[in-house]
Image (spheres, helix red, strand yellow):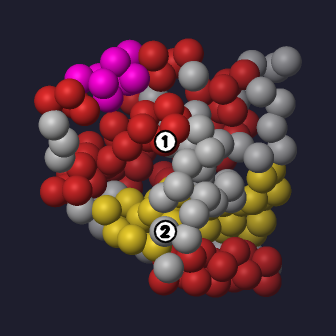
Amino acid sequence: FDHENVGEEVYFHILNHAKKYVHIMTPYLILDNEMIDALTRAAKGGIEVQIIMPHIPDKPYAFYLAKTYYEELIAGGVEIYEYTPGFIHAKCFASDDKVATVGTINMDYRSLYLHFENGVFMYNNDAVMQVKHDMEKTFEISQRITKEMCQGSLKKTLAQSVLRLLAPLL
């Protein structure tokens, strides 16, 4: 009710203050321009930015919409992985062995601006390293997405363009 987008600000803070890495797990990747800029700016600045997404979706439209961001993020230096065993529903950030978040806050418009979401911000404690190690294990069984894998047919590209137009409504 105070018009502060706390979840988004925490995510921006982590991205803008990272020194070595930011690892992210999210099931829904529906980004606005500011978040795309923050992710790619960190990556272009030498920060290892890696995102783990599900390989098997629970909501196909959200999954295909998320894939519309892959090529742009990869071109900006962000590494995208898909958790190949199935669907992953974690919403976590970990950075520099010092900071982590775990909660309900997706990287989409509804979570960042409309819903009442929950999250735990951790700083300089053992739980941060537990989140990091969980992510490392998840990366091991995930497939890295390449720019070539993002290429599609004209029909696919057109369908993805329509989804991007609808993104703020999803």
Left/right of residue 15 with respect to residue 147 in the rendered view: right
The quadrant the C terminus occupies is top right
Residue type pointed to by label 1: Phe
Picture coordinates of residue 126 (x, y %)? Answer: 79, 83
Residue 10 visible within the image: yes
Identify the residue shown where x is 27% and y is 54%.
74
Whole-Å distance between the Cαs marked 2 and 1? 14 Å
Q: Is residue 41 visible?
A: no
Res. 63 mark: 1
Looking at the picture, how far across and down is residue 82, in whole percent? 45, 63
Task: State left or right for residue 1 relative to residue 25.
Answer: right
Q: Which residues are magenta?
A: 158-165
The image shows residue 156 at horizontal and vertical percentages of 25, 32
Residue that label 2 marks: 84
Question: Image quarter for residue 98?
Answer: bottom right
Q: Quadrant of the N terminus?
A: top right
